[in-house]
């Protein structure tokens, strides 16, 4: 369903992208046609038809510009806009089809040929502009060209019959062409979405942990290097918190790896709830997590206090019982902290020192926080 909505949104986007150009061309051709026919058709009829067409084209253009500036991905809104666009195309086709009766001088074959020439060109242009949406393309072609074919058929002479049949064959050719073009355009859109999905999947595998969807070591190191560079320029402190879940191996050995995975997912969610959106929570592997805090105070003591507050929040949150299926489990973390600059100026040094501090927390009895010393 999401894929179908995305394809419809892409169809609408392409239709709107050519909308202004198509309507401008339609208006200019209408002006030329009206100018040529003024000498053989009553002026009030020509001016009335031209005025209605221009006003309607302006209205469609304004609606199209508004929709381009405020794109939507909601299923109902996308479909509503697509229906509205198709209705506009149908009315435009009716206005052009009306020329077969309003602007078709019976005694002037040369002017009749000019009207036919214009209508044929408009249907060909409509196919190109609207082919991404089969409904719009067929509506426009049929409503523009069928009236003049009926008109020729009703005249009843040999040439008129022949032109009517030729026009019908031309219309069949247009329908076959629009089907082929539509299929190609939809395939292009689909391939584009498939490529984006593949790129997203590759990026997800390369930079995010499969189990928890947290950044992995590779993305963490990239963000850490960036944070260190910003900290060096701004003077604001940062910190790296290295977390290890106490007795995690015992959980895996006694209750199974599926319960261990459930615990890791819940730990990831709780860690995200303890930090700001600008901070990073990553999983290095196993039961090891890293929290990177950025944009702390420039004062070393105050920055340490800020880190201690967050660390205690994490301890409190992770100490709450976990529901692993039908089993309630209590887990505790050991946390080691390494401050930017004071405890390392490279990602390797910070990770190593935060790891050392974490083992100090374990030696102190677990479920504790220790700063690197």
Image (cartoon, rainbow, N blue to C red):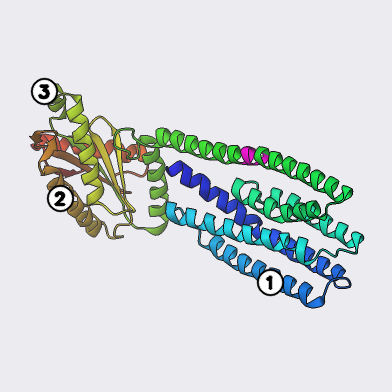
Tally of numbered discs: 3
Residue 244, placed above or below residue 36: above
x then y, percent, for residue 294: 32, 53
The numbered mark, 1 or 2, whose residue comes first in the sequence reads 1
Looking at the picture, tell me which residue is in the foreground, 268 or 336: 268
Under circle 3, the secondary element is helix
Dominant SS of magenta comes to helix
Under circle 1, the secondary element is helix
At x 77%, y 41%, the residue is 169
Dot 2: few (<14), some (14–19), or many (≥20) neighbours within 10 Å? Answer: some
State which region is magenta: 181-185
Distance Cα–Cα, label 1 vs label 3: 80 Å
Q: Which residue is mark 3?
A: 254
x then y, percent, for residue 323: 12, 38
Mark number, residue 312: 2
At x 26%, y 47%, the residue is 272
Residue 151 quadrant: bottom right
Residue 35, placed above or below residue 127: below
At x 67%, y 54%, the residue is 140
Dot 3: few (<14), some (14–19), or many (≥20) neighbours within 10 Å? Answer: few
Distance Cα–Cα, label 3 vs label 2: 29 Å
Q: Which residue is mark 1?
A: 52
Residue reaching furthest to the front: 156
Asked if residue 105 lies left or right of residue 333, the reply is right
Residue 236 visible in this rendered orientation of the protein = yes
């Amino acid at each position: 369903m999401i894929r179908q909505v995305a394809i419809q949104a892409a169809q609408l986007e392409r239709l709107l992208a050519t909308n202004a150009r198509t309507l401008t061309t339609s208006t200019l051709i209408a002006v030329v046609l009206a100018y040529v026919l003024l000498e053989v058709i009553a002026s009030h009829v020509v001016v009335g038809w031209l005025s209605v067409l221009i006003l309607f084209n302006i209205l469609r253009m304004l609606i199209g510009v508004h929709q381009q500036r405020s794109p939507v991905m909601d299923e109902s809104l996308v479909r509503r806009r697509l229906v509205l666009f198709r209705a506009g195309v149908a009315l435009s086709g009716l206005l052009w089809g009306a020329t077969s009766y309003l602007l078709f001088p019976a005694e002037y074959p040369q002017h009749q040929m000019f009207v036919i020439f214009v209508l044929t060109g408009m249907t060909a242009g409509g196919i190109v502009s609207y082919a991404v949406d089969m409904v719009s393309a067929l509506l426009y072609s049929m409503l523009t060209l069928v009236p003049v074919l009926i008109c020729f058929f009703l005249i009843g002479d040999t040439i008129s019959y022949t032109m009517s049949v030729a026009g019908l064959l031309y219309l069949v050719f247009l329908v076959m062409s629009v089907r082929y073009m539509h299929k190609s355009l939809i395939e292009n859109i689909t391939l584009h979405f498939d490529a984006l999905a593949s790129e997203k999947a590759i990026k997800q595998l390369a930079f995010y942990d499969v189990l928890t969807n947290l950044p992995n070591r590779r993305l963490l190191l990239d963000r850490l290097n960036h944070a260190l560079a910003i900290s060096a320029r701004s003077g604001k402190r940062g910190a790296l918190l290295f977390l290890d879940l106490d007795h995690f191996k015992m959980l895996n050995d006694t209750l199974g790896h599926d319960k261990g995975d459930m615990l890791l997912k819940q730990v990831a969610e709780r860690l995200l709830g303890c930090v700001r959106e600008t901070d990073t929570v990553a999983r290095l592997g196993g039961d090891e997590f890293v929290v990177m805090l950025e944009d702390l105070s420039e004062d070393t003591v105050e920055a340490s206090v800020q880190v201690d507050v967050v660390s205690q929040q994490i301890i409190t949150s992770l100490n709450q019982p976990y529901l692993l299926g039908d089993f309630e489990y209590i887990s505790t973390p050991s946390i080691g902290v390494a401050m930017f600059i004071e405890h390392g100026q490279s990602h390797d040094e910070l990770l190593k020192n935060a790891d050392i501090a974490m083992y100090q927390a374990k030696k102190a009895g677990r479920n504790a926080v220790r700063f690197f010393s």
